[in-house]
Amino acid sequence: MRIILCGPGYKNKFAGFYYSYDKKFLNGLIREGHNVVHFRDRDESRIAHTAVPPIGRARSNLSLLEICAHFRPELVALFHADVVTDATLDAIRKLSPGCRIVNVDCDALIDGHVMKRMVARGTRVDASFVTTGGEPLARLRAAGVKASYIPNPTDASMEDIDAFAVEEKSTDLMYVSSYGPGASQWAFLEEVTRRAPKVRIIGHGASKRRLLGRAYFEALAAAKCALNWSKYNDVPFYSSDRIAQLFGSGLCVCLPRSIGYQRFLGEDDAVFFSSAADLAQRLTAIIADGSWRDIGRSGRDRYRKLFNERRLARYLIAASFGEDVRGYEWSDI
């Protein structure tokens, strides 16, 4: 199949964030044998005219249309492709009749601006995919958007470390977040630290001091366990894409029961917790007896089996074209 994937390139933060959500779908689609053009809408806009952004955006859209005129895509997948206009989508349909156009977004749907852009784009595409379940997804559907849940993919060529197999460790539990020092995410980590004084705990990324690139994976390799504590931890099945990076890298992942991932992972695949006290108790035990290694290995294997980039690419195509997707564990969310 001829596919155009529109999404971020490798400029600015994406220079170090080469393992981002969209790049895994790019790899998965190619590995499934499809002919994929990666159109970097933001980069094209900056290259076309950095001094006058509206001119750059217009030229970016013209570049996409030129590609479509020659390539005649059968599927166009938009990954946070905000530069691409609705008028361009209409023009693509004329250039390539029968082409399916879908929108994929990995931000929290509970945020008002995310819901707003998903509703706006959802009326112009054939299908939408989000990494949020529960009531927010129901509201998106109620707004008339044909929306489906899609998990965060892992890619073994990107999450290329086996943290459970690394002998020398400097950290027992690591946490990565870009929120400011006073945010509730850091308060939770501080409470766990107080309750588990024998556990070596370190946090990275406060106030958007991002840990990116190989430095990020080096930090993962130096840790035994990792905390997956997102912006929203009471929304069913929502997590930032860090969940895939942690599981895919073979850490012993600790995540709240409230997001519902017990549907996919067993008690031997992760450390599920209900509170800071619960997590502190579990951490102290698994660090002491060394079982974090087995949990890390098991969690990696299970997550890769369910949510690898090729399987997610197959699901994306099947769902985009209205095929039967009941064999996927999340299809009824």
Image (tube, rainbow, N blue to C red):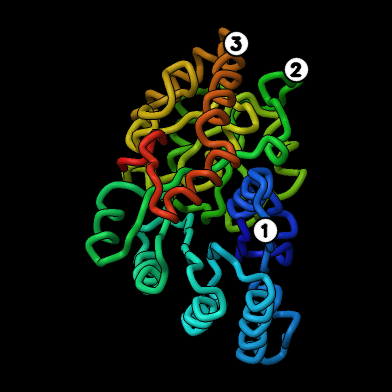
The span from disc 2 to disc 3 (Cα, nearest Å) is 12 Å
**How would you rate the neighbour count of disc 1 (Cα within 10 Å): few for under 14, some for 14-19, many for 20 or more?**
some
Which is nearer the N-term, disc 2 or disc 3?
2
Could you tell me which secondary element the residue under label 1 belongs to?
strand
What residue is drawn where x is 56% and y is 11%? 291
Type of amino acid at the residue the image marks with label 2: Glu
Could you tell me which secondary element the residue under label 3 belongs to?
loop
Q: Residue under circle 3?
A: 290
Q: What's the mark number on residue 283?
A: none
Answer above or below: position of 292 versus 235.
above
Q: Indicate the position of residue 40 as horizontal and vertical percent values.
A: 67, 69
What residue is drawn where x is 41% and y is 25%? 272
What residue is drawn where x is 45% and y is 52%? 183
The span from disc 1 to disc 2 (Cα, nearest Å) is 40 Å
The span from disc 3 to disc 1 (Cα, nearest Å) is 44 Å
Q: Residue under circle 1?
A: 36
Q: Residue under circle 2?
A: 167
Res 95 → quadrant: bottom right
Which is nearer the N-term, disc 3 or disc 1?
1
Which is nearer the N-term, disc 1 or disc 2?
1
- Quarter of the image with the N terminus in it: bottom right
Type of amino acid at the residue the image marks with label 3: Gly
